[in-house]
Image (tube, rainbow, N blue to C red):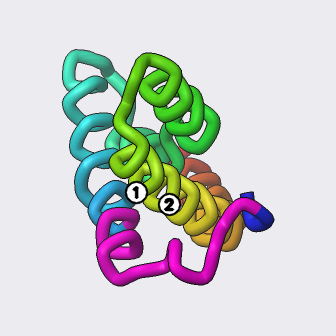
Amino acid sequence: IGGSLFWDSWSWRAVGFAAFLFFVARPISVHLGLLGSKAPIRLRNLAGWFGVRGIGSLYYLMYAIQHGLPEDIALELIHLTLVVVALSILVHGVSVKPAIARFWRARKSMH
């Protein structure tokens, strides 16, 4: 992923879009998707933070490009997608160990 990024791929718009996906869109969609489940809120929060990432975004982007997405829009979406995936690798990679540790500590204290 990093080798595919250009310096001009990074913009406040791309970083803001990633933040929106990480902190708003994914958590809300996961919570809505798990509404009828009996999953505890801690598990929903964990799934909302880590959720489905990366490869799905690249697959859907390539699908759209293969089905005639105009080149200018395709280039912009490639930049956005790669920035989001790169930030996801970084942010979620750094946060995974503390988040899982906190989840297990909270779970053990309940029993």
**Residue that label 1 marks:** 76
Along the line of sight, the residue nearer the viewer: 46 or 87 = 87
Along the line of sight, the residue nearer the viewer: 62 or 43 = 62
Contact flag, marks 2 and 1 (Cβ < 8 Å)? yes
Label 1: how many Cα within 10 Å (few below 14, some 14–19, many 20+): few
Q: Which residues are magenta?
A: 4-18
Amino acid type at mark 2: His
Residue at 43% x, 17% y is 67
Determine the main secondary structure of the stretch shown in magenta: helix
Q: In the displayed structure, would residue 55 be above or below residue 67?
A: below
The image quadrant of residue 74 is top left
The image quadrant of residue 69 is top left
| Image coords of residue 48 (percent x, y) | 39, 46
Residue at 57% x, 57% y is 82
Cα distance in 3D space between marks 2 and 1? 5 Å
Amino acid type at mark 1: Glu
70 sits left or right of 7 in the view: left
In the rendering, which numbered label is found on residue 1?
none
Q: Is residue 102 visible?
A: no
Q: Secondary structure at mark 1?
A: helix
Residue at 21% x, 17% y is 36
**Residue that label 2 marks:** 79
| Image coords of residue 14 (percent x, y) | 38, 70
55 sits left or right of 24 in the view: right
Q: In the displayed structure, would residue 43 be above or below residue 39?
A: below
Query: The N terminus lies in which quarter of the figure?
Result: bottom right
Residue at 42% x, 43% y is 71
Residue placed farthest to the front in the image? Answer: 71
9 falls in the magenta region: yes
Along the line of sight, the residue nearer the viewer: 18 or 35 = 18
72 falls in the magenta region: no
Q: Secondary structure at mark 2?
A: helix
